[in-house]
Amino acid sequence: MSAPLLQVQDLSVTFDVARRGSWPWTEPHKLQAVKQASILLEPGRTLGLVGESGSGKSTLARAIVGTVPVSAGRVLWRGADIAQMDASERRAHGRHVQMVFQDPLDALNPRMTVGQIVAEPLLTHMPDLSKAQVRTKVGAMMERVGLLPALVNRYPHEFSGGQCQRIGIARALITEPELVVCDEPVSALDVSVQAQVVNLLQDLQRDMGLALMFIAHDLSVVRHISHRIAVMYLGRIVETAGAAELITNPRHPYTRALIASVPIPSPKAERARPRPVLQGELPSPMAPPSGCVFRTRCPIAQPDCAEASPPLTDLGQDHLVACPHHAEP
């Protein structure tokens, strides 16, 4: 096992939300977007992060990148606490951690050409490069992501959604980072284009030795690209394991429900298999249930589930589950 590239230890992110119709000095609501999340990512590996909308996946990703303030816990990059870095160290760190966003068109500046968009990180992190060197790097990266270098003078609206996402990937990779955080990079794309983008990311990971954090709703996509998967619910990580282990042997009832929601290509098998259906809506993160946050929708909830939030327990083979009543293999 190689040394960790990224370690997140008991990370919490809380936002203040003003009370509607209240006075300015009134105490705001506390929205607990992420609570005591811990993950580990090694160089060249992919961590998949899955869960419903509102589970805290994107907030966790932005806290790791540094665009969202951390309320508690630590983010360690090669053992160094990001919060303790000075301005120059943070600038250097930004070169090694980049992000690919969900909506490819909204993530690109419509007033800049594709060449300017891809080159922008170079101007920030490698200001000593000449214009000729920048043009060479931009052309090579465009070609690497499957776009013609001759298109550098066009604008984002002239490209399809899949091409815009390739531009976003080129922009993220132009500084040769070690970690790329992909925040639902295929959810806005057609199914056939999704496969192309996922395969592109895998090829780039192999060629450049990238580590990836891949966030998605679709568990089948996450399974295809990930080495390890973490499942989030209402700001908590409720289960994490190797991709094959988690898919074939899910132990948390929420994970089992997510897997059951993935359709099977065979209509006969699809009709025959049991399908647990989650009841109710995702609770508000401003008023989460006491104890286990999943208990209000859990089919196996017990009275003790309301008493305390269950910690992640190692069941062996580095399979961690936050449920004392988890399913047996």
Image (tube, helix red, strand yellow):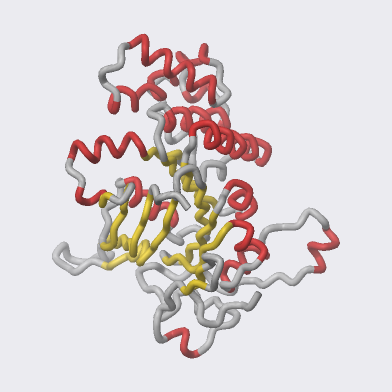
Residue nearest the observer in this picture, 166 or 188: 166
| Residue 323 relative to residue 96: left or right | right
Q: Farthest residue in the front direction?
A: 1
**Above/below status of 200 relative to 118:** below
For residue 299, which quarter of the picture?
Answer: bottom right
**Above/below status of 123 relative to 74:** above
For residue 28, which quarter of the picture?
Answer: bottom left
At which x and y percent is residue 173?
44, 31
| Residue 272 relative to residue 139: left or right | right
The quadrant of the image that shows the C terminus is: bottom right
Residue nearest the observer in this picture, 236 or 19: 236
Counting every numbered tag in the picture gives: 0
**Residue 17 seen:** no
Residue nearest the observer in this picture, 321 or 278: 321
At which x and y percent is residue 147?
55, 21
Q: Farthest residue in the left direction?
A: 25
At which x and y percent is residue 233?
48, 66
Q: Farthest residue in the bottom direction?
A: 303
**Residue 19 seen:** yes
At which x and y percent is residue 267?
83, 58
Q: Farthest residue in the top direction?
A: 132
Give the residue displayed 43% in from the left and 13% down from the top.
Answer: 136
Give the residue displayed 49% in from the left and 39% down from the top.
Answer: 103
Give the residue displayed 44% in from the left and 21% down from the top.
Answer: 114
Give the residue displayed 45% in from the left and 71% down from the top.
Answer: 283
